[in-house]
Image: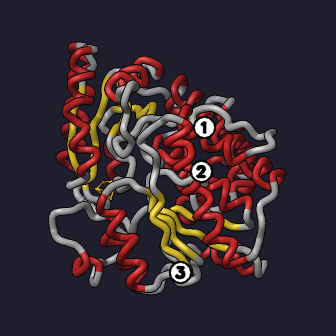
Amino acid sequence: METINEITDKCSNLAFDLNFRYAKHWKSKNEYRVLVGYLPIYFPREIVHAMNGLAVGIFGAGDRKQIIRGDAYYQSYICHLPRGIIEMGLDGSLNEFDGFVFPATCDCIRNLSGMFKLAGKGNFQRYFDYPQNFNSKVGGIFYRQELDKVMEDIRKINRQHASIEDLNNSIRLFNINRRLIEEIYAIRQEFPWRLSALETYYILRAGMVIPVEEHNEMLEQVLDQLQKERGEPMDNIRVVINGSFCEQPPVGLIKSIEMAGCYIVDDDLLLGSRWTIGDIDDNTDDPLEAMVTAFLNQSTFSSSVYDVGNPKGARLVEQVHRRNADGVIFSAASFCDPALLDRPELQKACDAAGIPHINFQYHENTGQFKVIKEQAGTFSDSIKLWA
Ligand code: SF4
């Protein structure tokens, strides 16, 4: 069994390999395998898995790539993520990918799908829309059609058909994956010093670029070792991070928040891996319908989804209470419309519930964290002294 340190080292390399060598190697072993790149936030990877494919999260270039041509494709007043991804598309990093899915997160990602189409990247460039109507006869039918379109895209490439058993099996594996992740979060809620937020981040992000079977094995090993004491408890406050669901903050930022005296007990980093709350039915004659039902009824909250009847502010407050957190750090990518437009409502909900909060913005390639560290440190001290 590998130690947690060995696993996190491996995961940090996998997670930030912008050439996706592991995924490409996986594909090279079988001529029917396909690689489908997808962007944040959420994409139902089960359907790709069931069709002999690997869904690979493309979550930005971070601070690891110089943007040369990417800037020419976008105006200056948008976030950084699409520039890095178009750069990766143009410099050949994504060449072995068979297709790309662009979830309906915001207009920037919608436009990126058009750019990939114009540039002829992959065999398909699918803009993947989500229902904003949660009636099964309206949004449900719509969502099922969206699932069918991606499956048809893949079918045209590898001529594979997903049987009911294939789909049930894929759902089962991703159920296990989400359960293991939730168990790790549950342990961190009680003993956050046993696995730092950064280690957790590496482990989760690696899961976006490797087969789910391998990720499940890793998570089981981590979980097993987390049963025993590891690390030292610190006099830290406990915070929930909100707003980092799409463009990912640089790892230095996550580290700075922790070093400033904050245990991150929940967050929306890599939210797609925990999008569905609870299991999806994996023993059914209609697995696609089970996925549709889960999307309509078991999705987490996010700024990219309409929340009629189930307001995000109330869900954030519930999350803070459930995690026994002391406050919220609103940390969003600069120019991220969905996160920044939601923020006043979320802050209002926190104020009404007496939950302290601070906020700042970042770029995925931000290199200076001194100001953020001071801000988080002051937040931590103020809660310890006066809350
Ligand atoms: S960071 Fe925000 S604005 Fe940028 S692509 Fe993601 S959701 Fe859209």
What residue is shown with label 1? Answer: 294
- Expressed as whole percent of the image width and height from the top left, the position of residue 103 reads 45, 58
**Real-space CA distance between mark 1 and mark 3, rounded to the nearest whole angstrom:** 30 Å
Tell me: 107 left or right of 10: left
**Rendered view: 130 above or below 192:** below
Give percent across and percent down for residue 383: 25, 20
* Camera-side mark, 2 or 1: 2
Q: Which residue is the site of mark 3?
A: 122
Name the outermost residue toward the front: 137
Task: Check residue 144 in the rendering and tell me which mark sits there, or answer none.
Answer: 2
Quarter of the picture holding the C terminus: top left
Label 2 close to label 3 by CB (< 8 Å): no
Q: Look at the image and tell me whether residue 54 can be seen.
A: yes
Secondary structure at badge 2 equals: helix
Q: Residue at x 43, y 46 (%)?
A: 269
Give the residue drawn at x 43%, y 24%: 319
Q: Secondary structure at mark 3?
A: loop
Identity of the residue drawn at 49% across and 68% down: 126
